[in-house]
Amino acid sequence: MKTKFLELKNISKSFGKVNALGRVNFYIKEEPEIVALIGDNGAGKSTLIKIISGVLIQDCGEIYINGKRMKNWSVAKSRASGIETVYQDRALALQQTLARNIFMGRELTNIFGFMKNKLQFAEADRLMRTIGFTSKVFASGSIVAKLSGGERQGVAIARALYFKANLTILDEPTTALSLTEAEKVFDFILQAKEGGSSCIFITHNIYHAYYVSDRFVILDRGRVIMETDHEHTTAEQLVKDMQKIAKSNGKVKEDINNGRS
Amino acid sequence: MAEHRSHVITGILRLIEKNRRALSALLVLFVMMIIFIIASPQVFLNPLMYKAILKTLPMFIILTSAMVFVIVSGEIDLSFSSVIGLAGWTFALTLRSGLSPYLGVLFALIVGAFVGFINGVLVTRVGLSSLVSTLGMNFLIRGLIYVGTKGEGTPVTYLRDTPFYNAFIGSIWGFPVNMLWALGFVVICVLLFDYHMFGAQISCVGDNMESSREMGIKVATIKTLAFVYVGIASAIVAVQFTLTNQIFYPGSGESLLLVVLAAVFIGGTPGWGGIGTIMGAVIGACIIGVINSGIIAAGVSYLYKEFFYGLIIILALMGHKLNEKRYQY
């Protein structure tokens, strides 16, 4: 059996009495792929990605990177494994400059911890130009609060791109974006795959998901209800499946995709 | 030539933009000085007046500069005034035990840092609001001092004119040495705040704590270090205070609590965290220092001192509000 880049086995997580995730198995293949993680509000998508990115610690279950079990998983270990996350709230500090946001928590410094400010500014400028954000608002000294929602999304994605991830997780990246801005996000995702990076793309928008993704994982009430891929489904079928899941009130069987392959 | 001139202008504008808040505070100081000089030229044009201000100004400068780190991190420290008392008491006790005054300084610094660490733990691990927990620590520590000292002071007059005394409180060509210590401290603060990753991470934490955590910044460590820094600053001030007055008394530092915080805000560091200015805090300290000494030197009743503090605070903050750029958050 081929080693997977990322594998989550029997992951459970509760917040008090709320079971956010219940014995979830999830994986990302070794070859670059784009996986859409779909589900209604409260399905557990954000919890799952926060566990993958190390922000939350699971109550039980294991995480494997390239077949090796990871102990004491953390944000630092997640990043060291090449996992970058672009959060729904974009994890930006709005009163700070674009350069400071890109290097937040990973400042370029000398051995004494003093920042290489000129280098950070130059790298931030280069990065924004590389991904096509050439407008003046994307100057590295710009305060992020000045940017529109889509522009802020661009900064958050640029940050993930700079650190050349093996796996980029995008949590609702196209919410509140214009069509042009959403297209830029799709270009980035496809570019990232061509460059050897996988993506987990979390979205409510089935059509956006279908446009870019290779595989689809549907969560409902903290469980993986369905898995399928581009070959074996259509956007319309996915929409129907989602509606069936929503109406089932959690009573749907986990083998909903039986007979569909 | 025209291009060079344009570069210079752009550079100046960028500098002004970067130091907007500090420049706004400088304007307040400038206007205030003009008014004072016009109202009382015999006092405010007299160099002796500034010699008097320089006696207490170093303490304000050290405390306000350090306090910027805590405020920018999104917290507040109301315990520093009693930490001044506790560190001063530690210093005095060390001397009374016959130990070297340099050891006294070391022990004072350790005590200051330790209280800062406790504040950090209470806020970041126990989850208390810094406003309430440091207020509680302020009372707790001050109470400890009064109980332990039975309300009695400890004189240190015998240190006068010793090399140790001259190193901390003496003067070089008429210029007070403790002001040099304060300026050295400001240089360290500027380096840490504007050029070191510590300052960058403090700003990110105060701006958006959750984002900082998601980006791997050790939020608890950063905030605790900020409290430790204020503790260390308080200890430095405690030693200076004790040496200047040549006595440790149990109420040391009590009067500094609100004026230091006022100076930080007058200097342009807002209360909501994420942004701040060390130079602004220094200017705020100068404003407070001038009011503190100037009012009385000008023959105005000391009863007006708090009135002037309040007036300056409100006018300065109104000025900062007008100066603030409006962003869509």
Image: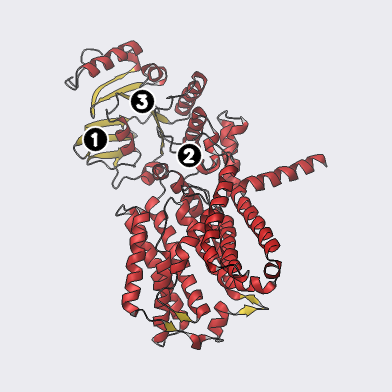
Mark 1 crowdedness (10 Å alpha carbons): few <14, some 14-19, many ≥20: some
Pinpoint residue A162: horizontal percent, then vertical percent.
Answer: 50, 37
Q: Nearer the viewer, residue B257 or A123?
A: B257
Q: Residue A35's mark? A: 3
Q: Residue A163's mark? A: 2
Q: Nearer the viewer, residue A209 or B30?
A: B30
Q: Splitting the image into 4 quarters, where does residue A124 fall?
A: top right
Which residue is located at x 49 percent, y 21 percent? A178
Q: Nearer the viewer, residue A2 or B33?
A: B33
Sequence-wise, the earlier of marks 3 and 2 is 3
Position of A56 with respect to B241 (left or right) is: left
CA distance separating discs 3 and 2: 20 Å
* Residue type (three-letter) at the residue carrying disc 1: Lys
- Callout 1 touching callout 2 (CB < 8 Å): no
Q: Is residue B221 above or below residue A218?
A: below
Which quadrant: the N terminus of chain B? top right
Q: Is residue A173 above or below residue B252?
A: above
| Residue under disc 3 on the same chain as residue under disc 2 | yes
**Helix, strand or loop for disc 1:** strand
Position of B130 with respect to A112 (left or right) is: left
Indicate the chain on which mark 1 is placed: A
Q: Residue A9's mark? A: 1
* Residue type (three-letter) at the residue carrying disc 3: Val
Sequence-wise, the earlier of marks 1 and 2 is 1
Pinpoint residue B187: horizontal percent, then vertical percent.
Answer: 58, 62
**Helix, strand or loop for disc 3:** strand
